[in-house]
Amino acid sequence: KRRRRGRGRGRGAARGDARRAKYYDQYAKEINQRGWIKRQGGEKKGWGKLFCIVSGPTMYLYKNTQQNSPIQTINLDGLHVEKISESKVNLKNILQISNPRTRQIFFIQTESSDYSDWLKVLKAACNLTKSVKETIAAEDKVLEEEARKKAEEEARKARAAALQEVSESDTKACSYVITAIAKNSKKGGLQKPGILTVDFEEAERASKLFKQYRAVTALDMTDEENNVAVEFLRALLLHMPFPLTTRKGYLTLVENTRQLSWLAMERVERYRSFIDSLPPNNQECIKRLLEFLCLIHYNSSFNGSTMEQLVDKFATAIIRSEKGEDDPQAKLDMPVVRDIVGFMIKRFPLIYPEEEEEGTKESAASASKDQSRSTCLRSDFRFTKSKLVLPSYTLKDRQAAGVQHKAVKHEISIAVELFSREIGNQGLLYLLNEELTDLSGRVGRLSTAKQEIAKWEEIVKDVSELKESMNELTEIRVEALEEIEEPLKQKEKRVYQLLAEQKR
C-alpha cells in the first residue's frame, strides 16, 4: 500500500504531547511502593507469596528479593482496583484488580499495616492517564478564561479610544439616523423622548451603563456593520416580554417533538400578537430601525443576498451570541428565532434595493457619485412601488465616512437601548393585559359557577322541603292506618264469632 504524505500533526500537537509527557512523568515519580503480597492467579490456583514493586503505572512481581528479572509485569494504567469485603471471601485485606477490556481478574492480599498504602498507590497507578487529562483540562480552562478577559479588556479600550476621537460637531452632523427613526413618531410622542435627540455628552455617559453597546463586538460574523445590525435587532427581541431562546430546563419539560413544536409555534404567535398590539408610534420606530438594518446590510460585504438570506444571517448570529454553536438547544431554537426575525422584517414594508436595468445603473452611479461622497451613509430614502430605493455607496465612500459612521453606530446603540426599554415596558403592559384578560375570564367563570351554585342551593332547599313533606305524609299515613286497623280487627273478630255460631 502507498504511504500517504502529509504535513504531520503540527506544532500544536507536539506541544500537547510535551505537556502530557511532563505531567505523566511527574505523577509517575510519586507512585512507588514495594513489599510482600499474596496473589491468587485464578480459581484453580492457590495463593502464592510474591515480592511486588509498583513503579509508575507498572507492577513487577518476583519470587524473592534476590531475583533479577520479574516473573510477570502488569500495566495498571486503565485498570480498576476495589476493596473486597471479608464476608465474600472469608479473608482480610483483599484487593481486586480487574481489566474491563479482557475481563481478567486477580486478587492480592497485603499486611493489615500496609493495606491503605497499597490501595492508595494502586488507585493512583490505575488513574494515571485520567489524572493527567484532568490537570491539562483545568489548566486550559484557566488559560481560556484569562485570554477571554484580556480580549474583552482590549476591545473595551479600543472602543473607548475610538469614542474619544469623535468630536461633538461630527456627532451632531451625523444625527440623521435618529431623525429618520423618529420622523413619523413625533406626532404620537414617546414615553421616553431620549430617542429623538441624544447629545454627545449624554450619550458618552450613557454608553458606560449600557451593556448592549459593549456587546457589539461579541458576535461572530465577518462584517462589523452586520454585527451592529444584528445587535440592534437582538436588543429589541431581548426586551420582549417572552424569552427569545429556550431557557435552562426548558427541554426537561418537553417529552416529545410534537409538544416541542407546539410550544415553539405558541411562542411565535405570542410575539406576533405582541408586535401587532404595540402603539402606532412604537411600530413606526421598529420600521425605521429595520430600515437602518437593511441599509447597513446593503452597504456591507453581503451584497447581493436575498431577504431570506438576510433573515438567516441575523437569526444565526443571534443564536451564536446567545448560546454558542455547540449548544444542543441552538438547533431547536433556530426555527423559532428565524420565524420571529422574519416576521419582524416582513411585518413592515420590505426595505431592499430596487432592481434596476443595467443601462440605468451606470448613469445613476455617475450622477450620484459626487453627492454620495458628500452625504455618505445618509438615509436618502425614496419609496417606489412600496419599496425603499437605497442610494449606491462604494467602498471608498464608506471609508470616507470614517469617524462619522462610528458616531452613528454609537448614537443608534443609545437610541436602541432607550427604545428597547420602552418596548420592555410595553411588554410588561402586554403581559398585564393578558393576565387581566385571564383574570376577567376566571371572574366570569366564577360568576357563572356562583349562579349554578345558587340554582343548586335552591334545588337542595326544595328537596329538603320535599323530604319534610314526605315525612309528614308518612306520619299521616301511619296514623290513618292505625285508625283504620282497629275497627277492621273488631269487624274481623265479629265475623269469626258469627261463623262459630253458625257452625253450632
Image: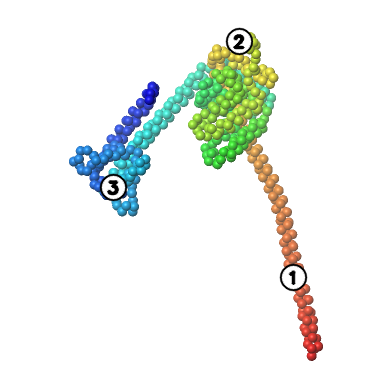
Q: Is residue 201 visible?
A: no
In x, y percent, where is residue 122? Answer: 31, 41
Kind of residue indicated by mark 3? Gln
* On-image quarter of the C terminus: bottom right
SS class, disc 1: helix
Q: Is residue 66 above or below residue 146?
A: below
User: Toward the viewer: 203 or 317?
Assistant: 317
Mark 2 surroundings: few (<14), some (14-19) or many (≥20) residues within 10 A: some
Kind of residue indicated by mark 2? Lys
User: On the image, numbered disc 3 is attached to which residue?
Assistant: 40
Q: CA distance from mark 2 to mark 3?
A: 93 Å
Q: Which mark is residue 475?
A: 1
Mark 2 or mark 1: which comes first in sequence?
2
Q: CA distance from mark 3 to mark 1?
A: 97 Å
Q: Which mark is residue 369?
A: 2
User: Toward the viewer: 368 or 97?
Assistant: 97
Mark 2 or mark 3: which comes first in sequence?
3
Identify the residue shown where x is 78% and y is 79%: 488
